[in-house]
Image (cartoon, helix red, strand yellow):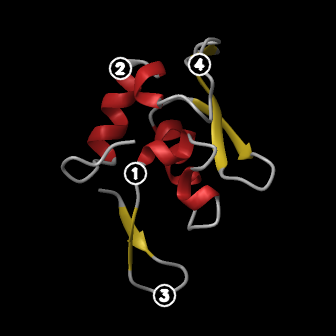
């Protein structure tokens, strides 16, 4: 499970990458938001990523492009749909390898 230092208490903070695609992820944006960590990982892998805050909610990834081709299908309702079901397998595999969740933890 991805882990970093909690900005509030200095202790460990555990999260899942799927929250970066969920309107209500990271405690509806009230928690420590790690969307930029997911975006940076994808960018380092050669993708172009766009994300921003959804009103007062979470910072959500809404576009991932590779060679100028959008990787999120038009049929996906980003913010609500499970990203494991709409992202290409190569992206899911990359995120699972680099940001693995604890056993049994999924959206």
Question: Label 4 neighbourhood size at 10 Å, few (<14), some (14-19), many (20+)?
Answer: some
Q: Position of residue 6 (x, y in %)?
A: 47, 77
Q: Position of residue 9 (x, y in %)?
A: 48, 87
**Tag 1 secondary structure:** loop
Is any part of residue 25 visible from this angle?
A: yes
Residue 20 placement: quadrant: top right
Which image quarter is the C terminus in? top left
Question: Label 3 neighbourhood size at 10 Å, few (<14), some (14-19), many (20+)?
Answer: few
Q: Earlier in the sequence, mark 2 or mark 3?
A: 3
Residue at 40 percent of width and 69 percent of height: 4
Where does label 3 land, which residue?
9
Measure the C-alpha gap from mark 4 to mark 3: 36 Å
Above/below status of 28 relative to 66: below
Where does label 1 land, which residue?
16
Q: Earlier in the sequence, mark 1 or mark 2?
A: 1
Measure the C-alpha gap from mark 2 to mark 3: 36 Å
Q: Earlier in the sequence, mark 2 or mark 4?
A: 4
Specify the label residue 89 is tagged with: 2
């Amino acid at each position: 499970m991805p882990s970093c230092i909690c900005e509030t208490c200095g202790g460990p903070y555990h999260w899942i990458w799927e929250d970066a695609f969920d309107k209500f992820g990271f405690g509806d944006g009230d928690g420590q938001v790690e969307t930029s960590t997911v975006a940076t990982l994808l960018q380092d892998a050669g993708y172009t990523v766009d994300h921003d805050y959804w009103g007062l909610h979470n910072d959500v990834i809404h576009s991932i492009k590779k060679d100028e081709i959008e990787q999120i299908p038009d049929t996906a309702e980003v913010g609500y749909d499970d990203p494991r079901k709409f992202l290409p397998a190569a992206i899911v595999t990359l995120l699972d390898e680099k940001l693995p969740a604890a056993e049994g933890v999924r959206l």
